[in-house]
Amino acid sequence: MNWMYLLRRIGQMILTLWVVATILFFIFRLMPGNPLAAYIDPTFTAEQQQELMRQFGLDKPLWEQYFIYMANLLQGELGQSFFYKDSVTSIMMNVLPNTIYLMVFSFVIAYVLGILFGVLFAWYRGSKFETIGLIATLITRSAPQFWVGMVLLAIFSFHFGWLPSGGVSAAGSQYNSEWDKLTSLEFYKFLSLPAFTLIFYLIGLPLLLMRSNMLDVLGDTYVEMAKMRGLSKYRIMFKYGARNAALPVLTAMAVGIGYTIGGNVIIETVFSWPGIGRLLVNAVTASDYPLAQGAFLVIAAFMIFMNFVADLLYGLLDPKISAGGGK
Amino acid sequence: MEQMIEEQKGKDSELYIILKNSWSNFFNFFKEDRFAMVGLIIYLFVGIIAIFAPVIAPYDPHEMLRYDGEYRTNAGPNSENILGTTNMGRDVFSQLIYGARPAVLVGVSAAFMVVLIGTLVGLVAGYYRGKVDTFLMRVTDVAFGIPFEPFVIVLVAFLGPSIWNIVLAMGLLLWRDTARVIRSQVLVVRERGFVESARVAGASNFRIIFRHITPNILPLALLYGSLAMGWAILTEAAISFLGFGDPSAVSWGFMLNDAFVSQALSRGSYSWFVPPGICIMLVVMAGFYIGRGSEKILYPRMNQY
Amino acid sequence: MMKRKWLFWFGLAVLLTVVISACSNEEVKEDVVKEENVVVDVDPTRYLDPISILSRPQSAAPDEYETAILIRDALIELGAETEVQTMPWEQLADIVWYERDQWQMTGWQMAARPERLDPDEFTYNLFHSQGMVDGYNFMGYNNPEYDALAEAQRVEVNQDVRADLIKQAQQLIADDAVYHFTVHPDINIVYNKDVFDEGTITDMTGMGARNFWTYVNAEPSGDQTDIILNSADNVQAVNPFYISGSTDSWITELIWDRVMRMNDKGLPEAWAAESVKWVDDTTVSVVLRDGMTFHDGNPVTAEDVKFSFEAPKTGEVPMYQPFVEYIEEIEVLNDLELVFHLSQPWAAFETASLAKLNIVPKHIWEPILTDLQDSPENAESFQEDVPVGSGPYKFDALRFQEEVVLEANEEHFNAPKFDRWIVRIIPNMEAALGMIQNGEINFLATYTGDAELLNTRVEEAGNLEMVTSVDLGFRFFAVNQRLEPFNNLAFRKALQAVIDKQLITQIVWKGFATPADSVIAPTLEFWKNEGIETPTGGIAEARNILSEAGFAWDEDGKLLKPE
């Protein structure tokens, strides 16, 4: 990989970000539903509404609003929420960690398990074990998420009472720091159901990918050699096979993380998990443009960045691609 | 979305060889691959149910049923209502049957948009290369930079909760995977001898693209279409669950949401809560089965094991 | 081979299902009723435009949506083409509120709030023609006779005479078919008997068991000394000068004291005041309790109260402005005594003002309001890091989208018996129901799900108790009187006749509601007009009303406007 490629790729990333930000601005400004509708009350006068419009800068022409928005964006300023009357950045900082905990935890487990089973399925290709395993995997990929979540909730929380049914911590519990929270058993109790639902959904991709990569690798000469040398099954599987097959799966993980950050709305709603997906949906229904826009933009930026990371990883894996798509 | 990763694994040459005889293979493999066969059967089955829904369904899915002048609400399975009734006295089985219609509608139209847009973008970018390619790939990058579920929610909130808007919103983004895969495929195919000979023989670009290149990438596009179908149906269900669904279309997603807000789960009305979920799963899985079956025509090396 | 067989059976099962289902299909027969009033060769201009009913989606407000469906079906039966259009609340409110000639009919609701226990707000603000352009009278109801009644009750200080005026106003609303009332929903509150002593829960008129008095006076029956309740909505702000969501108002009520409070009977009584005396029709003298302190240790004085009531006049507290409208002057006599001078007699002063405004510490808010004078923002967007009031609970923590924790104020003259009050944000109603059963919450303060199911669960549980009370608020459908066909009184009366409230109560609310016929809840016996008469005869009566007013039907049963 060379520096020119890296620079060009960074340039492309910024361009993409700008276009996405622009699209977002127009989508949200052209949306129907007056932000002031949230304030409707028998006691509200027309003058007060005008005043609010002015406060939020909604009385200015659209292009002017756009430039103000872009200028603010460059300074990392995402504006003020209509609904919470607080800065969008600080509102998001409240929930972003929760989203990240849930995501990282689930990804690590899903990918470890996925890679493991992927290897096993490849090794036992054609067996009953593989067939049943594959069907099970496809089920995880095709079950509606909220449906799975609700069933888990009904079983483990309502029926057996083993796990709490919502939130990130017990009522009124206080942690001295985020670290304390992350090292407390309590937190993982609350994390387990939403994480399980997410893992259930995530595990399919690494598993199937690993399986097909592994099938390729297993055909390579050095694996044949290893077999002939009489090395143990597991040694071949993991030392020779998996090591070579796992890199593309890690690339997939980069992209996957990017996608999942915005797609957690359902899990966050089912399990009352205070995360950025729920924040975004609430903001959209409340016509809270600045907040919806901010949350959307953060999610998008994260995704674009992860795509970039994945691209660089491809480049590392296969120099042909970094030269520009196989030309 | 994850398919983009699989495509860039450097399988181009094998893929090409297979695609050369692809059409006959594409239909043959249904015969040989049980998974693909099951997938196809599910598709056909749902299609038939959708077409004949008014004949099959015993009641109007919206009708609040009355027996002896009394509304029959929250009934379990009984002789008149195979799967019982909803909390508002509507027949669950009839809703399930009618639910095949939006599923087919959403699935097929999303798949159509994905195949159409994705193939066109991929073909044009891959064939013309240069500036056209760069531009189209930047557009694709932008599409990849927009989070899918949030975008659909925002757009549907914007345009109003109708099934067509949901399809439109999905179509606006889901083509991105197909476009990338098709493009890299086209980049390989266009260097092949038969394309070269067509060019030498003076065939127009239009002709080369649609006569010579398209047949070679179409099976791949259709595969992506079948996956998109599953995505679309799942997304429609999720959107319904979040309250942005089309209230007039009795889809399986709508049914699940209806059951959910009416607390069918707490009430133990499994005959209401479970069947629509299974229907969704079956249809989505059918897409995967076909996809998995296609593995064989796409990656034949695996047959060695 | 096994797989093949399986496939075969699967296919067979599928085929059988199709065949059996097809056989069981019954033909639905439509009876076409012949009318005497049938018009042949219709003048095309006589056809009605299709009617559109706005409603929130089923997932957000199942009751509203299902009611809309029932009304739609009734209108269709009457021969009027009708559809239900759903949209999120914000979009719906936007159209109804800002585009007053763009909608025909909409679902709406009025929520219970303590100050609404006095009939003034519902009587005056909702229907006075003053509100037609930008106020709450979005229906465009304009009746000078009504305006006169609404104005008269405002200044009538004799409550008996005033009650009579309020009753007349209710009848007029029914006669003019301004609102199409459906129900006063039941408020179903569930608490855990292992946590709460049963006798100490207060069921407040029109507000249910979820109220200030329960939170302050309830006593623990076991070791659990936290009240843990649920809310479906996020907390927007904890601000004494900002009327935001209902969850927010539960919190502000507990953190800040008020001069008076609505008691469990729905009448204002002195709270932070030793006494509230009417010297004459426009003069009220208030003596504060001795020894009250803010949570930061400073004493509560008459100056703080004066400041709290004058702040809305600075323009920095717009939402509270109407509640101090008729206060002309506030005179501080000493640390604990002050006198309110009103510009005109004001019947609802105690409820709408003394029991509404929060007493804020002047030493904290005066500098803030001064700063705000020079900025485009106002006090509504100011969030204190630690809100300071003098109320029975102190602010402890706010975890966004998660919970708000309040701590008991031991120093308070009415100190709570519980140690903490914690509201958890649970958007999933099914989860909330699960939580009250497994003990994660011990007070189910919000429940919008199926009441019948809740009741069953409570009976099964043994340690749960459900308190059911009639809501002060009500559900209704508003029609736009600016537009056809709702500008025609006969059509509105016909609509009244076909809205089957008994059916709505039974089917949509599963019996957990009371049919409504007025803005005043039946529990407010003093104000409620018990003798309101409206047409209830269903389709037959509706047809009569319409025929008499010149409406007719074509051969296919479609409704035609009068010639």
Image: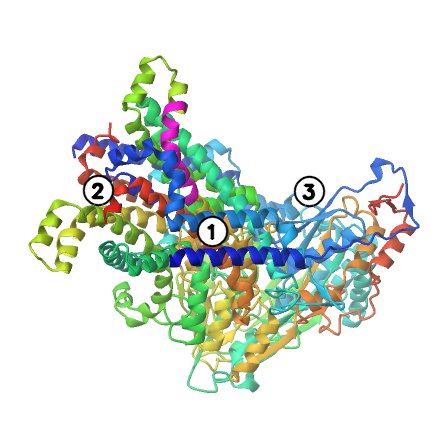
Where does label 1 land, which residue? B283
Please state which amino acid type lies under the numbered disc 1: Val
Where does label 3 land, which residue? C102
Pointer 1 chain = B
| CA gap, disc 3 and disc 1 | 41 Å
The verdict on residue B224 being magenta is: yes
**Compared to B209, does A275 lie above or below?**
below
Pointer 2 chain = A
Q: Secondary structure at mark 2?
A: helix
Contact? badges 3 and 2 (CB < 8 Å)? no
Q: Position of residue A320 (x, y in %)?
A: 20, 33
Extent of the magenta region: B211-227
Q: Please name whichever residue, C288 or B10, is drawn nearer the observer in this view of the structure.
A: B10
Q: Nearer the viewer, mark 3 or mark 2?
A: 2
Where does label 2 land, which residue? A313
Q: Residue furthest left?
A: A229
Position of C174 with respect to B81 (left or right) is right
Q: Are marks 3 and 1 on the same chain?
A: no
Please state which amino acid type lies under the numbered disc 2: Leu
Q: Are marks 3 and 2 on the same chain?
A: no
| CA gap, disc 2 and disc 1 | 34 Å
**Compared to C106, does C393 lie above or below?**
below
Q: Please name whichever residue, A90 or C124, is drawn nearer the observer in this view of the structure.
A: A90
Snapshot quadrant of residue A175: bottom left
